[in-house]
Image (spheres, coloured by chain):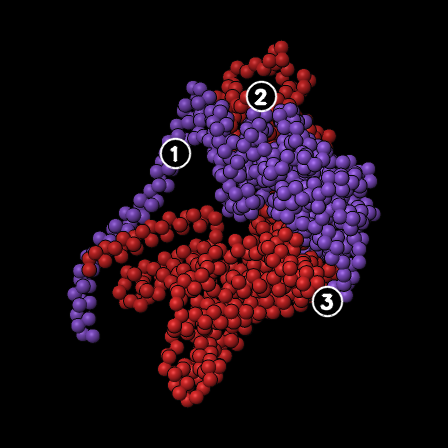
Chain colours: A red, B purple
C-alpha cells in the first residue's frame, strides 16, 4: 500500500516539476497554445492522481494524453495550417519578419566594397572608440555609438597623429583591444558604429584574431524602418513607402522578402478546386488512387486468403515453416524491398525481363518496358504492393480461419453442402465479420501509400501534355507532394495541408460507409 | 460496498499525513528542477557586477564568459574541422561547437530552429538552398571582402541572390565524362567522334547517363544557348529558356544521339554497372563516382562539345552561411572569413571529403596532386550553377520528364488531354510551358 503511494507521489512530483520547468520555456518561445496545453494536462494529471475519486480516469488518462499530443494536436495543427499561407517566403511571424528587415543595413552604391583596418579602443569609463584607417587623409577617430545615438553624436575626427611611420600608436588614456578581446565583446561591438557624416558610418564587419580587424562603410540609416502607425515599411535607400499587400511589404510593385504567415481562410481550398492547372490532373489522379487502393486491398486479400486456406488444411506437414516463409516479405522493411523490386523490374538489365526473355522470344513479343509505360508501371505498382501486403492478409485470415468453429462446416457437410458452397455461405461471411474493419484500414493505408509510389516510380511515367508535371502512377498524396513540396515556388505547406484534409474526408466517408456494411454483416452473422 | 467505504475512510486518515509529506517532497523536487537555472544565474551575476571594478585597473581582463559559436556541419566536414577549431578557440577565446548534422536535414532544420531561437550561428549548405533560405529570411548576407579574390566566379554567383552574397563557397561539383582507358585514350571532342570511338572499340553500349534526371541531362539542353532561367545578375524566374532556339536545337541533337545509339537509355545504377562491366565505353557523371568507376581502368575527360560549344553541366556548390537568427553576426562572419576560409582549413576539409575546391589557393594544391580532379574542375568552370531561386522547384519535374521522353523515345498522344508529343521540340515546349504555369500558379 505505502509503496504504491510513494511510487505514485514520486511520479506526480516528477511530472509537476517537469511542468513547472516547461512553463518558462514556453513563455520565452511565446507558444501560447503549448502553454495552455501543458497547464491543462498538468491540472488533469494532478486532479486525477491526487484524488481517489476518479479511479477509472487513472487508467484512461495516459492514453488520452498520448492521443491528444500525437493524434489530435497534429490533426488540428494540420487543419490550421491549411487555412494559412504557410509557404516558402512566408514561414515567419510578422514581428520576426519586421525585425529581420529592420536589421538590414545598406551600403551606398559608391562606397561598396571599400574595406579598411579598424582598431577598437576603450577608455576608463568602458566606452568603445573606433579608429578607422580609410587612407592617409582619412584616419578617423571617434566614439562608437549605438543606433539610438547616431544623430546626437558628433562626427569622427581626422587624427593623422595616431599613426607614426604607418604604425598605429595607442593614444594616452585608451586601451587597445586585441582581436580576442574584440571577440569577447563582439555582441556589443556589432551594434556600434563610428559616424563619419550625416549619411555614412563605419561598422565592424570582420574581427581578426591574427591581424587587424576590418571595417566597412554603410549608410547611417538602416535599409528599412517600420512605421507601425500606418503599418508601412519605409525603404530608406530609395525613399519608398512600402505598404502591406496581403503577406508582404511591397515596394514599387516588388515584394520584399521575407513575408509572413497570415490566415487566408479558404484560399487554399479555392485554389485546389478553381485552378484549372490543378483540377485537370486531379481527376486522373483521384481515379487511379481509388483503383490503386481498391485493387491493392483486393489482390493482397485474395492472395493472402488463398494461401491461408491452403495452409489451414489439417493434415499438412511443416505448416509452421511454410507460414514463416510467407510472412517473410512482411519482415523486410518496405523501402528496402521496394528498391530491390525497382532493380528487378529494370527493363534492360532487371532479373524479371531476363527471366521472361525466353517467353518473349517464344511468343515473339516486345519485352515489357516495366515502369516506363502507363500500363506496365501501374501493373508493377500493383504487383509490388501485392507482394508487400499479402503476408499481412495471410496473417489475419489465418487467425480468423482458426477461430471459425469446425462444427459449422461439418454441419454443412452433413446437410449436403459442397466445399465451395460451405466456403461462400459459411466461412467467407464469418471471415468478413472479423476481417472487414482491417480491410478498411488497409484501404485507408494504401490510399496514402506514399512510400511505395515515391520509391518505385516516383509517380512516373509522366502524363504527356498535362499542365503540371504529374505521372500515371501518382496517387493523391504523391501528387500533393509534387504540387506543394517539390513544385511551384518552393514549399507550399498551406496548400499541401488542404489536400491532406480533403484526403482525410475521402477516407472518412469511405470508412463510414464500409463500417455500416460491416455492422450489417455482424448483425446477420455476429451471433453464430 | 459498505466494506469499501470503511476501508476508504480508514485509509483517508493515513493519506492526509502522507499527502502533506509528498507535497513537501514535490516542492523540493520543483526547487531542484529550477535550481539549475538559479545556479547559473548566480554564477553569471557576480561576474557582471565584478567586471567594472576590475576594468578600471585594466580593461583588458573584462572577459565575460566565452562566446559560443554553434556550427552545423555534415559529418565529413565536422571531422575535418574538429582538430582545427582548437587553435581558433585558443586564439579567439571562444568556444566553437561543431554539431554533426545530416546534410539534407540542415536545410529544413535551420528554418525551423532559427525562428524558434535554437538554430546555429554558422551552417554549411548547398548553394541551391539560398533562394529559399533568403526568401524565408533565415540567412544573412555575407560580405566576402578580400577573400572574394581567391574564389572562382561560379562559386560566388552560386551564392548570390537578389544582389547579395549569402555564403562562402568551399566546394564545387559538376559532371564530366568517364572513359574506359583500356579501350579508348581520351574523350573525343565531338559526339560524332564519340560514337565512332564506341564503334571502333566494339562495345555494346556507348554513353551512359540517367535518363530521368534533369541534372545529368542539363548539358543536352543548355550547351547551345538554352537555359533554365536567364542568369544575368541573379536568376530571373520570368525568363524560362527551356524552349528557346538553342535549347530546342540541342534537344533535337540529343534526339539524334539517342536514335543512332550514342546515348543509351539507363538509370543511374544501370549506367554504372554497364561502365563497370565494360559494356559501355563512356559514363557521364560526377566526381562522387570515382570509387565506383575504379572497377575498370578509367580516365576522365570533358563532355563532348555541341556544335563547337563547350558542354555546360549544372554546377553544385557548397558553402558556409550565417544564420540571420544568430545574435553574433559579426563573430559568425569573422569565424568564416578568418578561420573557415583559410587554406589550411580548406585543405583539411578536402582531405576528409575530396570535393572540387572552390578557392584558387586550394585548387593550386589539388591540381598538382590529382589531375582527374582538375578535369572535373575544368568541366565545372564551363558550367553554370544550378539556379538557386525557389522557383527551381518547378523545373526539376517537367525538365526531367521532357528529357526522359526524348531519352526513352516515348513520344505519343496523351489519351486524357489529347496532346501529342511527336518529337523533341514538342517535349521541350511542353516542359517550358509547365514550368511557366507552375511558377504563375504557385
Q: Considering the image in quadrants, where does the N terminus of chain B appear?
A: bottom left
Residue at which label 3 appears? B416
**CA–CA distance between discs 3 and 1?**
72 Å
Please report, as a chain letter, where disc 1 is located.
Answer: B
- For residue A505, above or below residue A184: below
- For residue B182, above or below residue A274: above
Residue A173 screen position, x and y as percent: 51, 17
Please report, as a chain letter, where disc 3 is located.
Answer: B
Neighbour tally class for label 3: few under 14, some 14-19, many 20 plus, Cα within 10 Å: some
Residue A115 screen position, x and y as percent: 65, 25
Label 2 and label 1 in one chain: no
Image quadrant assignment for residue A118: top right
Q: Residue B45, labelled with which disc?
A: 1
Assess whether mark 2 and mark 3 are in contact (beta carbons under 8 angstroms): no
Please report, as a chain letter, where disc 2 is located.
Answer: A
Q: Is residue A37 left or right of residue A483?
A: left
- For residue B244, above or below residue A528: above
Neighbour tally class for label 2: few under 14, some 14-19, many 20 plus, Cα within 10 Å: some
Q: Is residue A327 left or right of residue B329?
A: left
Residue at which label 2 appears? A212
Indicate which label's residue lies in the foreground, 3 or 2: 3
Q: Residue at x 64, y 69 (%)?
A: A287
Q: Is residue B204 left or right of residue B51?
A: right
Nearest the camera: A171 or B413? B413
Residue B265 screen position, x and y as percent: 70, 50
Q: Residue at x 38, y 37 (%)?
A: B41
Amino acid at each position: 500500500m505505502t509503496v504504491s503511494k510513494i511510487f505514485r507521489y514520486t511520479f506526480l512530483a516528477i511530472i509537476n516539476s517537469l511542468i513547472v520547468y516547461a512553463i518558462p520555456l514556453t513563455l520565452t518561445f511565446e507558444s501560447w497554445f503549448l502553454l495552455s496545453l501543458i497547464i491543462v494536462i498538468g491540472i488533469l494529471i494532478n486532479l486525477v492522481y491526487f484524488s481517489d475519486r476518479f479511479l477509472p480516469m487513472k487508467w484512461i488518462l495516459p492514453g488520452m494524453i498520448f492521443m491528444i499530443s500525437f493524434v489530435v494536436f497534429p490533426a488540428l495543427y494540420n487543419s490550421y495550417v491549411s487555412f494559412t499561407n504557410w509557404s516558402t517566403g512566408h514561414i515567419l511571424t510578422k514581428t520576426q519578419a519586421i525585425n529581420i528587415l529592420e536589421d538590414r543595413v545598406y551600403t551606398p552604391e559608391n562606397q561598396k566594397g571599400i574595406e579598411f583596418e579598424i582598431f577598437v579602443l576603450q577608455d576608463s569609463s568602458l566606452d568603445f572608440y573606433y579608429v578607422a584607417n580609410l587612407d592617409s587623409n582619412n584616419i578617423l577617430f571617434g566614439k562608437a555609438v549605438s543606433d539610438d545615438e547616431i544623430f546626437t553624436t558628433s562626427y569622427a575626427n581626422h587624427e593623422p597623429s595616431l599613426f607614426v611611420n604607418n604604425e598605429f600608436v595607442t593614444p594616452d588614456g585608451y586601451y587597445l583591444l586585441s582581436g580576442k578581446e574584440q571577440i569577447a565583446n563582439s555582441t556589443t561591438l556589432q551594434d556600434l558604429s563610428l559616424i563619419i557624416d550625416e549619411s555614412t558610418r563605419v561598422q565592424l564587419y570582420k574581427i581578426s584574431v591574427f591581424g587587424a580587424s576590418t571595417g566597412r562603410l554603410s549608410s547611417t540609416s538602416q535599409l528599412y524602418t517600420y512605421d507601425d502607425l500606418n503599418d508601412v515599411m519605409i525603404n530608406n535607400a530609395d525613399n519608398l513607402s512600402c505598404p502591406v499587400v496581403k503577406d508582404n511589404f511591397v515596394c514599387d510593385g516588388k515584394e520584399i522578402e521575407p513575408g509572413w504567415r497570415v490566415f487566408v481562410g479558404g484560399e487554399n481550398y479555392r485554389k485546389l478546386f478553381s485552378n484549372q492547372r490543378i483540377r485537370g490532373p486531379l481527376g486522373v489522379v483521384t481515379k487511379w488512387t481509388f483503383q490503386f487502393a481498391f485493387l491493392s486491398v483486393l489482390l493482397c486479400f485474395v492472395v493472402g486468403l488463398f494461401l491461408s486456406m491452403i495452409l489451414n488444411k489439417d493434415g499438412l506437414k511443416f505448416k509452421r515453416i511454410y507460414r514463416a516463409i510467407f510472412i517473410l516479405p512482411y519482415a523486410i522493411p518496405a523501402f528496402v524491398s521496394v528498391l530491390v523490386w525497382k532493380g528487378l523490374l529494370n527493363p534492360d538489365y532487371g532479373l524479371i525481363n531476363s527471366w521472361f526473355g525466353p517467353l518473349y522470344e517464344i511468343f515473339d513479343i516486345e519485352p515489357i518496358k516495366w515502369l516506363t509505360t502507363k500500363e506496365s508501371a501501374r501493373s508493377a505498382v500493383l504487383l509490388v504492393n501485392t507482394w508487400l501486403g499479402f503476408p499481412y492478409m495471410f496473417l489475419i485470415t489465418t487467425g480468423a480461419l482458426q477461430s471459425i468453429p469446425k462444427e459449422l462446416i461439418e454441419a454443412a457437410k452433413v446437410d449436403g453442402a459442397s466445399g465451395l458452397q460451405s466456403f461462400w455461405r459459411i466461412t467467407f461471411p464469418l471471415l468478413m465479420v472479423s476481417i472487414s474493419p482491417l480491410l478498411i484500414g488497409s484501404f485507408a493505408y494504401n490510399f496514402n501509400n506514399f512510400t511505395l509510389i515515391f520509391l518505385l516510380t516516383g509517380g512516373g511515367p509522366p502524363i504527356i501534355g498535362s499542365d503540371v508535371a504529374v505521372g500515371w502512377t501518382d496517387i493523391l498524396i504523391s501528387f500533393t507532394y509534387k504540387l506543394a513540396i517539390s513544385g511551384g515556388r518552393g514549399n507550399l505547406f498551406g496548400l499541401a495541408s488542404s489536400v491532406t484534409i480533403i484526403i482525410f474526408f475521402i477516407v472518412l466517408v469511405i470508412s463510414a460507409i464500409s463500417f455500416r456494411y460491416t455492422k450489417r454483416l455482424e448483425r446477420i452473422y455476429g451471433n453464430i | 460496498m459498505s466494506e469499501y467505504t470503511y476501508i476508504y475512510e480508514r485509509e483517508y486518515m493515513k493519506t492526509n499525513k502522507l499527502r502533506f509529506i509528498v507535497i513537501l517532497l514535490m516542492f523540493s523536487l520543483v526547487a531542484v528542477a529550477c535550481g539549475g537555472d538559479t545556479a547559473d544565474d548566480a554564477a553569471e551575476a557576480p561576474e557582471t557586477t565584478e567586471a567594472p571594478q576590475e576594468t578600471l585597473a585594466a580593461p583588458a581582463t573584462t572577459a565575460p564568459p566565452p562566446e559560443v559559436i554553434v556550427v552545423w556541419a555534415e559529418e565529413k566536414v565536422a571531422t575535418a574541422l574538429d582538430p582545427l577549431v582548437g587553435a581558433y578557440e585558443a586564439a579567439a577565446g571562444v568556444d566553437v561547437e561543431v554539431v554533426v548534422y545530416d546534410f539534407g536535414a540542415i536545410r529544413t532544420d535551420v528554418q525551423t530552429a532559427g525562428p524558434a531561437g535554437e538554430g546555429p550561428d554558422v551552417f554549411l549548405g548547398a548553394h541551391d538552398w539560398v533562394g529559399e533560405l533568403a526568401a524565408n529570411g533565415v540567412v544573412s548576407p555575407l560580405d566576402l571582402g578580400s577573400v572574394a579574390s581567391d574564389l572562382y566566379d561560379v562559386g560566388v554567383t552560386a551564392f548570390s541572390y537578389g544582389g547579395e552574397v549569402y555564403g562562402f563557397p568551399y566546394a564545387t561539383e559538376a559532371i564530366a565524362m568517364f572513359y574506359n582507358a583500356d579501350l579508348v585514350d581520351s574523350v573525343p571532342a565531338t559526339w560524332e567522334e564519340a560514337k565512332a570511338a564506341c564503334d571502333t572499340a566494339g562495345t555494346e553500349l556507348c554513353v551512359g547517363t540517367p535518363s530521368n534526371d534533369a541534372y545529368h541531362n542539363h548539358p543536352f539542353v543548355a550547351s547551345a544557348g538554352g537555359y533554365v532561367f536567364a542568369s544575368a545578375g541573379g536568376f530571373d524566374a520570368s525568363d524560362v529558356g527551356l524552349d528557346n532556339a538553342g535549347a530546342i536545337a540541342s534537344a533535337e541533337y540529343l534526339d539524334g544521339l539517342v536514335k543512332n545509339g550514342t546515348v543509351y537509355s539507363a538509370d543511374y545504377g544501370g549506367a554504372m554497372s554497364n561502365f563497370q562491366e565494360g559494356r559501355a565505353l563512356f559514363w557521364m557523371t560526377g566526381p562522387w563516382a570515382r570509387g565506383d568507376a575504379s572497377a575498370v581502368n578509367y580516365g576522365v575527360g570533358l563532355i563532348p562539345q555541341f556544335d563547337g560549344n563547350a558542354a555546360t553541366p549544372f554546377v553544385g556548390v557548397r558553402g558556409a552561411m550565417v544564420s540571420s537568427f544568430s545574435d553574433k553576426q559579426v563573430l559568425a562572419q569573422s569565424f568564416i572569413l578568418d578561420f573557415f576560409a583559410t587554406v589550411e582549413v580548406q585543405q583539411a576539409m578536402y582531405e576528409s571529403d575530396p570535393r572540387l575546391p572552390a578557392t584558387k589557393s586550394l585548387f593550386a594544391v589539388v591540381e598538382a596532386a590529382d589531375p582527374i580532379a582538375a578535369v572535373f574542375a575544368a568541366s565545372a568552370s564551363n558550367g553554370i550553377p544550378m539556379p538557386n531561386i525557389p522557383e527551381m522547384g518547378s523545373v526539376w519535374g517537367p525538365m526531367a520528364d521532357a528529357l526522359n521522353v526524348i531519352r526513352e523515345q516515348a513520344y505519343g498522344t496523351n489519351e486524357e488531354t489529347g496532346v501529342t508529343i511527336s518529337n523533341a521540340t514538342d517535349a521541350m515546349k511542353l516542359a517550358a510551358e509547365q514550368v511557366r504555369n507552375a511558377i504563375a500558379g504557385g
